[in-house]
Amino acid sequence: MYPQLHIPDGFLSPQLSLLLWVATAVLVGIAVRKSGRADVKLLASQPILMGVLGAFIFAAQMFNFPVATGTSGHLLGGVLAGYLLGPWAGTIVMATVIGIQALLFQDGGLLALGANAFNMGIIGTLGGSFVARGIGTALGGSRSASILGAGAAAWLAVVAAAGFTTLQLGLSGTTNVAIGLPAMLGVHALIGIGEALITVAALTFIAQTAPDILAGVAAPSKASPVRRLVTGVAIAGGVATLASLFASTDPDGLEAVAVQLGFLNAGEVSPFELFPGYTIPGLDGGASTAVAGVLGIIVVIGVLFALGRLARSRAQS
Amino acid sequence: MIAEPRSVGRDARAAVIATLAFVTAVALLPPGSYLALLFAWLLLAFAGALLGIGPTRLARRGLVALPFVVAAVPIVFLRSDELLWAGSVGPLTLQVSGAGLRIALTALIKAWISVQASMLLLAFASAPSIVTALRRMKLPEVIATSAGLTIRYLELLRDEARRMLRARTARSASPVGSGRERIGGSISWRARTTGNLVGSLFLRAYSRAQRIEEAAASRGATGSLSIGTMPTADPRLTIKVIGVFALVLALTLFGALLPRL
Amino acid sequence: MTDQHEHPHTHPGAPLPHSHGHEHAHDAALAPTGDGTIAISHLHFRYPDGTEALRGIDLAIAGGEKIALLGPNGAGKSTLMLHLNGIHRPTHGTVHVAGAQVSNETIGRVRAEVGLVFQDPDDQLFSPTVWDDVAFGPTHMGLTSSAIHDRVETALAAVGALDLAQRAPMRLSIGQRKRVALATVLAMNPSILVFDEPSAGLDPRGRRELIGLLQSLTQTLIVSTHDLELARAAFPRSIVVDRGVIVADGSTSEILANRELLLAHGLA
């Protein structure tokens, strides 16, 4: 039972893929700024620690535990990375790991990398780590409360990432959310239990055997009852929102949204138009949208290239 | 998995751009563009042949993405347009939709082709030279450094994990009196055991990071550590990139013009 | 000296020795359940990448024998040892341990009969306390908690590590960790113990203690080593493996006296 979360290329509409690339790039960009002044410091050199722990997460994903004959649980590790490195650096490490998995192991697509890094890195690690801290605070802020919070968040992160993955496939018209969403959420609710158990056990192990190392991880502060209450309510509200998003997603509504955003064509199922409704005179429908699509990409690349040139000349002068 | 790098230190930017553009072009093809997809695969097979990878080997290794097709299976049965077949299988009433089948099959072929494209990228340029290319393309330094170190220590830590798993397997005996493999202990005990393995591996990784830092510090490195030097820039980069986009344009046009099934 | 058949063959088809009620018996003293025999015939093994690591191994070992496995790096010693515990399975040929052929049907039993002690104790030890680590095997075997308690205590006592029970393995010295790693397999009551380079990384005193410990064990012992003095001190029989075949099998003193043989196979 590996988490089925690494979407290959071909399953997502190109428009949605690009949108998620941009969203992920912006958020990872913020993470890069924030990770410089990290509140979690295990080593003086954050980049060295991040690089080696990236390899660690990779390797830790190999560890399985037998659930029943022929079935075993595996770790994804997002919340674990966020706990050990802080949410921002953890997010960068997770996004990097997902990128390397796509590039070196063909586990997840290159165009789908934005989506995969969004689901497992942004939702699973960044979101998961803040939820973990929130729960830790709400539970009183001791070390064991924070580890318990990480466990709960690890479960939530896996389930949420599965939910987002399915919604994206649904928006792209490659899965039917009426069947896919309950199935994915159900399976990952089980996988998430393994994730939670492994995360808690790993952090407990580290806290027991090497308390000195974990001391570098921002010791959770004792919070006032008011703050605990507020954090608890905020987390509960967030989880409830997520749950209602998944619960209320109806396939027809999702398809309508997908058509509206241009991920799907209502009649001809063609996730093809970059600019819906845009046509070039003199060419028939199909060809003209194709040309429009390519022109659009060339324009975007051109703008990025020009910006890069500009930035370089600024830097030199 | 990881192909033997053909060269270290060549400017891989053109190859990275070409791969991304190719994968995007394939993704842009509408469902049912089997002819255009065949053309795209022939392009890959040609590139593979230039790199010394035969088409059968390439095609076989592209199969790694296929398990994900499970995600696209429901669509075959749950769309009600272009009904190809309807009937009951046991207690279930099933209908097979032509449109759904087309979507699922196209997604499958696209995934298969895209995987081969990234395999070829790796056969052309080594992992470190791809990271260098990405640095040139303005990948933030902290990501480039950590990606470089992750790649460098990946096999080492995976090897440690493998040895730890092997030692655990060697001790995973069955309950006394039973022949066939059975598992003792509760599920939570087994999960805790796995968590302990993860925690142990973390401590090993951490002490390795400490040693790397000490070694870097003793060489006078501060803050970020740059990995290797940049290879000389490819003088024909612009021409190559223009060529790539011409090809992508052609592929997309094929997708629009060739008949779809 | 190179005669491979001077040792009695066991009977591969012999029924499994029974161990009924053993976990309830109060003699949780680690009396082996099996007969400690090993019979290997025509063993060939090829790795998935095509490397042919073992090319026809025939070997018979009687219960309680003490054997040093010698040979240069890459000769196939580790590959051979991993077959005894079913981690690797033969490409051709058969492996019998304690009368049972290693197969999917017997693997759970085989792992209890054969204790593998790896070269790096850090690969073997992963629990927060020494006690938990030694308890892993018995717990996985589904023993009752009182039986687990007895087994752990006896195994730790056997290696003189009872006082370390509540310590964290990673905080111990290399010598202590090696002893604990041995205890983790002793607690499973194996009739065969297989060691990979047990003396690597030990200082002279640690090495002396190790030799004493090895000599105190009653199980069949197979030890892969480059340490010829260790072989001479604790192992009456030696087997030299090179390029996937057994090139010599006989008394340790004779083999170590054959300088030509040692030179030919990178041992001297």
Image: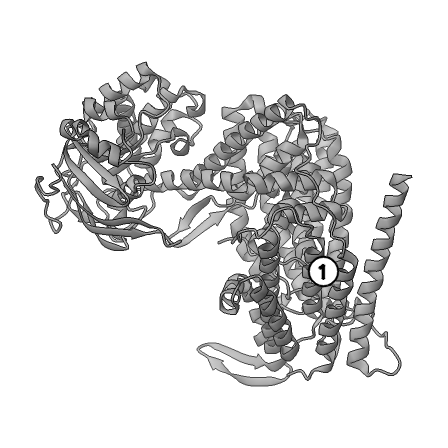
Chain letter of disc 1?
A
Residue shown at 78% from the left, 79% from the top? A287
Outermost residue to the front: C260
Q: Quadrant of residue C262?
A: top left
Q: Secondary structure at mark 1?
A: helix
Q: Quadrant of residue C111?
A: top left
Residue shown at 78% from the left, 74% from the top? A290
Residue carrying label 1: A17
Horizontal side of C244 relative to B246 (left or right) equals: left
**Is residue A149 shown to the viewer in this render?**
yes
Horizontal side of A199 relative to A166 (left or right) equals: left
Residue A312 in the image, given as x and y percentages of width and height: 85, 44
Horizontal side of C1 relative to A52 (left or right) equals: left
Q: Quadrant of residue A15?
A: bottom right
Above or below B78: residue B186: above
Above or below A144: residue A273: below
- Tag 1: residue type? Ser
Residue A78 in the image, given as x and y percentages of width and height: 61, 43
Above or below B44: residue A267: below
Residue C33 in the image, given as x and y percentages of width and height: 17, 37
Above or below B57: residue A57: above
Front residue of A290 and A118? A290
Residue B139 in the image, given as x and y percentages of width and height: 74, 45
